[in-house]
Amino acid sequence: MNHYKTLGLHPRATPDEIRRAYRILARRYHPDVNPENASKNKFQQIAQAYAILSDPDKRREYDKQIKPNEQQRPRPKRPSRPTPKKPNLLDGLKSLFVKTAQSIPTPTHKVSVIEVSISIEEAIKGGVKTVDFVEPEATRRISVTIPKGARDGEIVRLSSRSAREEIICVLRHMPHPVLSLERRGIIVKLPVTLNEAVAGAKITVPTLDDPITLSIPPLCQSGTELRVKGKGIETSRGRGDLFYQVLIQLPEEVSLGVQSAIESLSYNLKRSLPNPLV
């Protein structure tokens, strides 16, 4: 079985291309989506191919195994007279041992793929999470180490040499009303009042450490992100950043006086634009 063909990839595919192809095929042939036996077998082949090609060391060894096969393609013959080679005892024994080793069946390597749901807090802080691994034979409890700053879709591998088994855990973020974690850092939704957005304000906001005072600039648009450097997740490359996403929050009810003032403000803002709407 050619693992590259299983994932529909070229042997020179990049790690991102391998990861993207696996995600598409794994969702298509997942047993929960396609309960047929053929889909289950296809899913196991996809998981095994990804387990080898996504690991640099395993992929390097695999490429060494398939490279001789590619070199066996017929080449144009050169008009040269071959030199007769005398039979050699060592060459004969070497050929015999190679054929014998190839005829010995290799032990099967079981690969399973599961999705592990984690909260944003668990993704930010990291730690160990115990989950139930459901198999046709039984249900096992396994411990998954969540790396600090784990992103959605990140892979964690669990392996057992004695059982020749590998479990690929795909980490999935659970939705959070305020927090999200992206490659650039932690995103925090920050509700502000209309007055704070228009006039500007200083607001005390929480961080991973102590609260800080954040300045809201005047005429701040909803959706604006305010970056705070060095207050994010601690990594081997240094401390990451925090991003506060401003969301203008309007009151549920307003008095007639406030409504009149808002209408007057809206009218004056429209007249101040380069091309007035009214």
Image (cartoon, rainbow, N blue to C red):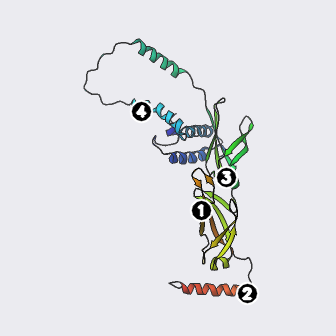
For the C terminus, the image quarter is bottom right
As rendered, which of 96 and 151 lies closer to the eye? 151
Q: Amino acid at mark 1?
A: Lys
* Dot 1 or dot 4, earlier in sequence: 4
What residue is pinned by disc 2? Answer: 256
Numbered marks: total: 4
* Dot 4 or dot 3, earlier in sequence: 4
What residue is pinned by disc 4? Answer: 70
Of labels 2 and 1, the one closer to you:
1
What residue is pinned by disc 1? Answer: 229
Q: Secondary structure at mark 2?
A: helix
Q: Is residue 207 above or below residue 260?
A: above
Q: Amino acid at mark 2?
A: Leu
Give the residue drawn at x 58%, y 84%: 269
* Dot 3 or dot 2, earlier in sequence: 3
* Dot 2 or dot 1, earlier in sequence: 1
